[in-house]
Amino acid sequence: MEARCVRPAPRFRCLAAIAVVLVPFLTGASYRTTNFVVEASSVEVAKSVAEHAEVCRATIAKQWLGKELNAWGAPCPIRVKLTRGEAGGLTSFGFHRGRVSDQNMTVEGRLDRILASALPHEVTHTIFAAYFGGPMPRWADEGASLLSEDLRERQRHDRIADDLLLRRSDMPLARLFKVEEYPNDLMSFYGQGYSISRFLVEMGGRPRFLKFVNDGLRTSWDTATRTHYGLADVRELDRAWRSWHKVVARSAPKTDRVVVRAQSSTESE
């Protein structure tokens, strides 16, 4: 049985060995490396994205897994759309018998923001998909992928989480950990997922975070919390995270506060 997983993007939001294939298109060009084939408006843009995707793939895999991934059997397609706005992305996966069967990625925005933000985020999803061989919990997949983005984006999500907690609009972690579908208030969900992921990584490192998530899926989140973080249960973890965030919020710059609200049904995606 094959499972499919699609991840939406928020609305605003070391070189590998390279084998090059250039293919002209009526409206752009394609550039291929070992693990990616990129379609963009020009060869220069496609080359820049493809080579940076290889760098991200190698670097991020080492951070999370302690080693690089083997080359994929088929390159991951990336479609690039340049705009004047902030960067965003979307990656879809197919899973079959505990392995990724196919994957497709789209990134858009200004090129500098794509390279600094959207591309590392989306490539992190591919690392997690390869590790788990199936869908990762939404909060962890998005929250931990935000750790790969640049300082500007990480600080923005710190402020989102701070505002969320001040308004008491966050979810208890016992509920957050079980969310299977993306909620309407997507940015709040991303902000809280980022904050708890950052907290857990700072407490025990990235490999332990992955083991915690894996065990939480297989057994229970309470058991995983006791095993990997020495806390009694998820409620105790929730309290520890909130105490940690208060310290983080006090030390963070107070300017440019981000106010998050739920998206109404009349707003466009």
Image: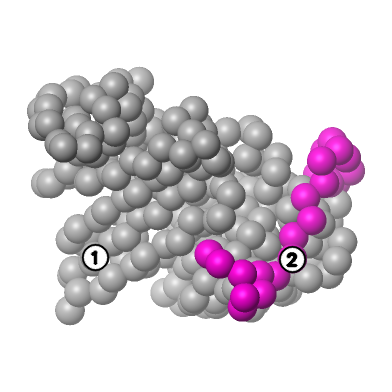
The secondary element bearing badge 2 is classed as loop
Task: Residue 34: give x, y in percent of width and height.
Answer: 16, 33
What amino acid is at disc 1?
Gly
- Residue 94: image tag: 1
Few, some or many C-alpha atoms within 10 Å of disc 2 (few <14, some 14-19, many ≥20)?
Answer: few
Q: On the image, numbered disc 2 is attached to which residue?
A: 261
| Image point (32%, 50%), residue name | 105
Task: Residue 202: give x, y in percent of width and height.
Answer: 64, 44
- Taking the image as shown, residue 176 lies to the left or right of residue 49, namely right
Q: In this picture, which residue range is highlighted in magenta?
A: 247-269
Q: Quadrant of residue 224?
A: bottom right
- Taking the image as shown, residue 216 lies to the left or right of residue 5, namely right
Task: Residue 200: give x, y in percent of width and height.
Answer: 62, 52
| Image point (29%, 22%), residue name | 44
What amino acid is at disc 2?
Arg
Could you say which is closer to the camera, residue 230 or residue 79? 79
